[in-house]
Amino acid sequence: MAKPNDGKRSLWVGVAIIAGVLVYAYGFTATEVDLARIRDESRQERLVNIVRALARPDLVEYDQAETVTELEFRIPCPSNREAPTPSSQDRYIQATPPCAEPRAEVLLEGFGFPANQTVRLALVPTSQVELRLGDVRTDSTGAFAIDVRLPNRPADEPQMILARTTEPSGSPRLTQTATDTFDKIIETVFLALIATTFAIALAIPLSFFAARNLMKDITSPLANVAIGVIALPLGAGAGILIARLASELSSSATSNSLLAAGGLVVVPYIAWWLLRQGLPSEDDGRQAGVTRWARQGLLVGLAFLAGIIALYLAADLLQVAGDWLAPRLGVFDFLGTFLSTVGELLEFGTVVIAAVGGAGALVMVGNRFGHAIRRHLPTRTLQLLDVPLAMAAGAVVSLLIAQVVAWFYQLTDSPRILWIPVGVGGLLGLVIAARSFRSDNVKVGLATYYLTRTVFNVLRAIEPLIMAIVFVVWVGLGPFAGALALALHTIAALAKLYSEQVESIAPGPLEAIRATGATRLQTVVYAVVPQVIPPYISFTMYRWDINVRMSTIIGFVGGGGIGFLLQQNINLLNYRGAAAQILAIAIVVAAMDALSSKIRERYV
């Protein structure tokens, strides 16, 4: 006896089948599936030609030698026509009939020619001006047959029918296409390598901020968080100002290489000494007054300034050394160019380092100040103090967001970009402060986790092709733009993969290390890193493989690599050249897969 549910199940199965048919029927219409195009003979012929061209990549070429085979022919036939004498040569042509009237059709046959070669037929009259009769391709045995129409060139003397063929001779050599393909595939591999290694340096530390199991337990008092938020842009601005001052101070030394080298030895030592004198101890943090805090802050600031000056000196020395070595290293001149470029990058990045360092230093100072006031003020006073601090922090964040929006949309209205954001941010800070009366601790870790994840998701949503277009406008055509685009996308992709691996580690070692009283940094180093090294290696090799294949598409918009060459050949319908690039890509991908397999087998 059938159960009532069986009928309902059958009904739902039938409805699902009908819905699936409807979906796929509409999908066929949306994707314009047209089998009539497949049966089109002209399309089939073009497809066959393309496939055959792709099967013969343009890699090797020979010197070409032209061979001419002659046949004596009369127009018109003479009165005393004789039977033609059979040819005793290995390669010959014959005409049927052996002579003919002007404008008559004649069957020309050839034997002993190279197989599958084009033969150009021409008539040489008494004027010695060649008249083209037609082209024909030999079969697999080297024979051909073609009907040609004779020109109106009567003459009493014999005329000549010529059969010209171009045949390879000498030793094979690489074509220009093969040479260009080799250069570009090497460029592609290193483009992907630079992008991947640069991305690793940022993706690994960022991945820990995107791991929920590491960030969910991190909390901080509201006052400390608010002070840190306010100190962050102030510290970044101070770092930029210090970088400008350091640049001016170091410019006098960079005019003399010996003076710059001496400064590079002395200045870091001075920076280290100032930093040791300026960093407060735990006892200083409990007992220090305003004077001691001011003195320590001044010493740390001077140490920071000295460190930035040392970076500028190092950048200048690298550029000078690279420019001096490049013309003297011969075939290794790229080493000198590398040093010079690293110096330029260091000089360019020193401002960023100063901004990040200044922001971090001021946030740390603000955090210590927050802990100090919490030790000296009663709880009720701290709760009241949280309100203005939270409102000020909210106003700062809202104002920064408004300035970014104003820059994008070119807004200049002061109320919209200044007062309204400050008011909205202050109101949000007031709400947060009101909620903190129950619990003074703010879940800073989760906020950082969600912010980091959001940034990664946005970056991964933007295709590297779009990023490459932007970077091509910025740095120009070439592999540098492609490397920047791939690196930016790889940072987000690898950081996501790394963070998910951190989230899946065994919790036992993590809890054991925490139980010993280890700091968060020690917990990461001794409990997290040993568990994630093997998958990190695997993910990194896989991403390098992806970047090699993705650089092919990057090249279509001028991002360098073999994709640029592939696009040119496709646009020019040079499918044999495109086949050479496709073959090179396949070989490199297969080689990288074998390499990554060996590395995973050994370390993973």
Image (tube, rainbow, N blue to C red):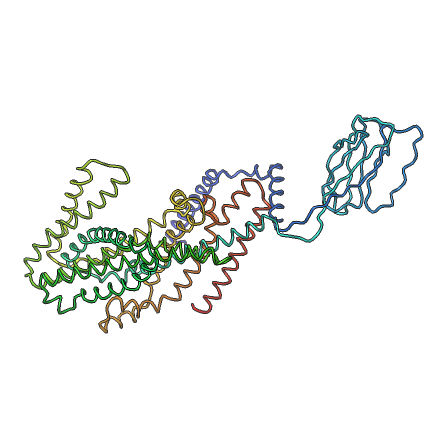
Residue 303 visible somewhere in the drawing = yes
In this view of the protein, which residue sits in the foreground, 461 or 99? 99
Residue 355: tell me if it is visible.
Answer: no
Instruction: Report x, y in % for residue 258.
Output: 34, 60
Q: Is residue 595 above or below residue 76?
A: below
Q: Report whether 199 appears left or right of 277.
A: right
Residue under the point 81% across and 45% down: 91
Which x, y percent locates residue 321?
40, 58
Relative horizontal placement of residue 566, taking residue 497 as reference (left or right): right
Image point (42%, 63%), residue name: 538
Quarter of the image with the N terminus in it:
bottom left
Residue 205 lies, in percent from the top left, at 31, 60
Q: Residue at x 62, y 37 (%)?
A: 41
**Quarter of the view holding residue 124:** top right
Vertical position of residue 365 compared to residue 466: above or below:
below
Q: Is residue 225 left or right of residue 168?
A: left
Front in this rendered view, residue 340 or 43? 340
Looking at the rendered structure, the number of numbered marks drawn on it comes to 0
Q: Quadrant of the C terminus?
A: bottom left
Seen from this angle, which residue lies furthest bottom? 516
The spot of residue 341 in percent (x, y) is 40, 54
View extreme (right): residue: 80
Which of 118/158 is in front? Answer: 158
